[in-house]
Amino acid sequence: YGCSTCKSADKPLEGYIASLPMETSHHRVESQSTKCGFGLQGVCCRLCSNGPCRITPKAPRGICGATADVIVTRNFLRAVAAGSGCYIHIVENTALNVLKTAQAKGEIKGEKALEHLAEKLGVTGKDKYEKAEKVAKAVLEDLYKPEYEKMALVEKLAYAPRFQRWQELGILPGGAKGEVFHGVVKCSTNLNSDPVDMLTDCLKLGISTGLYGLTLTNLLNDVLLGEPELRMAPVGLRVVDPDYINIMITGHQHTIFVDLQEKLRSPEAVAKAQAAGAKGFKLVGCTCVGQDLQLRGAHYADIFEGHAGNNYTSEAVLATGGIDAVLSEFNCTLPGIEPICEELMIKQICLDDVAKKANAEMKPFVFEKREEQSQEIIDEIIEAYKARRGKVQMNLFPEHGNDDTLTGVSEGSLKEFLGGNWKPLIDLIVAGEIKGIAGVVGCSNLTAGGHDVLSVELTKELIAKDILVLTAGCSSGGIENCGLMEPEAAKLAGPKLRAVCEKLNIPPVLNFGPCLAIGRLEIVATELAEAIGVDMPQLPLVLSAAQWLEEQALADGCFGLALGLPLHLGLPPFVTGSKLVTKVLTEDMKQLTGGQVIINGDAKESADILEKIILEKRQGLNI
Ligand code: SF4
Ligand code: FE2
């Protein structure tokens, strides 16, 4: 299975994948390299049986009369609604798990986080359980409101000047699930033909996705799983230790396996593992849920081996042969892992029925049955371990990755590190020691020059310009495996940022963890804006989802636009077939929310554009 076209920013990983005896996503890039030009531009419609209709200069309308603008916006809104639905599913499950834990008087690891969240939402209670219950109920009530009833927590969660702007623009969202439903209905055949009206829905979906699916999911996770704490940790394929029974986790819903996580570290489970010939159990992080566990690694040092890699590293993690089971509960769990699991006798268990893998065991998480489910899962994984070890060849890669990645960065831990407030960071920005901040967020894909190539190259360019980079999403997994989150990476930064990093002994790229943590970046931005006394679009802060992948990323992107932030994308989101939509997103949005989309696939050019925006914003602030 040699692979001459496999490309990753992570050269050791690229070599490892090319040498594998099995096919991975990287190998399939070549056979899918001829792209459909209509699809790329978003001008293919197959909403009805007259189609598929494809727009060309000679055929500017579909049979029904739909123009390129209509077809592009319908496709875009569909994608944003689906992406929003995914995040709302995550926050719904998370809130339900907080609610049920509170009612069962289960463990609340993050009491400070609960206090903080209760205060933010204006919730009181006689004890932590009542508070947690009321917090969860407030979130769920909002999610379940119909589309025509505005959500109550938006005003409490959003920065006041932003809320006001959203109100003026008429984009305050109704119930989050209702908005998804409304969006899906709106873009069916022969209903809506007003692109601007449909783009308005995208902004509403962006706000509900961002404030609930992103921000609140993190804050609820903190309540059940404990708050992030700064620590150094190993990353990469090196974290697979064959002496243990290794369970790779993929997905986005950490609260689904709270009980299992605790049981795996219990003396009873360790004794069972030892009886089977292993030292114990280890969770191996993969994709966003792995990032979430890594973020909280300080609380789980005994059970968590480390974060191995992102979505398009997952096949390689399995190919090491050291993984005995995959626990998956949501997306970024590639179908491509299925044949590899089959071949290497790796047990697959799915914990959420929206994400049933074809050859996996389905065990949808039921809170009331959590204890027996955890027990069953542990026993099944031990059986898998016994059945496969010794029979399956190992192809470990202990040299891959590094041991010194700074993890556990959050709005809370970073502020604490700075002395309890943002003043030191603001001072550094004002003094020009840090030119500005860039959030390099979102996924990884295999198209923008290869796996993590654009994200890593752009990050290098930005830090060289003295721009501090904060990451969230699968991009984090690639950037950390490439060593940019080691304090030593300071030497890759420009002279000013380098001096700051060396003084504080931090890397120039700070890892906030999963894509959900884009919500944490929103909190940082809000608190910075508040401290300076400006609105968010005035901050020298830019976002880049350089290697955005999924529909969810498009919903996140709409949140960024609603916040009024410049948003760079390495690949266009299938909209360039409509001049109108492209213009609204890249130009007109500046007058509406303050945000703008920048599309550029070249790392150097993109960094120059983002730097120019940061310099303009600095000028606007007179700094
Ligand atoms: Fe063609 Fe209109 Fe049908 Fe789309 S909805 S396939 S543009 S006729
Ligand atoms: Fe993610």
Image (spheres, rainbow, N blue to C red):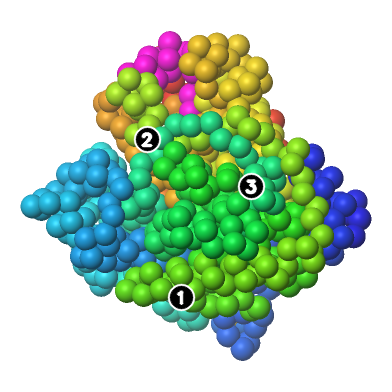
- In the rendered image, residue 424 lying in the magenta stretch gets the answer yes
- Disc assigned to residue 331: none
The type of residue carrying mark 1 is Pro
Which region of the structure is painted magenta? Answer: 423-438
Which is more N-terminal, label 3 or label 2? 3
Give x and y (percent) for residue 230.
44, 31
- The residue indicated by pointer 2 is 411
Query: What secondary structure is found at the residue carrying circle 2?
Result: helix
Inter-mark Cα distance, 2 to 3: 24 Å
Dividing the picture into quadrants, the one containing residue 528 is top left
Inter-mark Cα distance, 1 to 3: 25 Å
- Disc assigned to residue 308: 3
The type of residue carrying mark 2 is Glu
Give x and y (percent) for residue 73.
51, 64
Query: What secondary structure is found at the residue carrying circle 1?
Result: loop
Horizontal placement of 547 versus 97: left or right? right
Which is more N-terminal, label 3 or label 1? 3
- The residue indicated by pointer 1 is 364
Horizontal placement of 396 versus 572: left or right? right
Image quadrant where one finds the N terminus:
bottom right
Residue placed most toward the observer, 383 or 320:
383
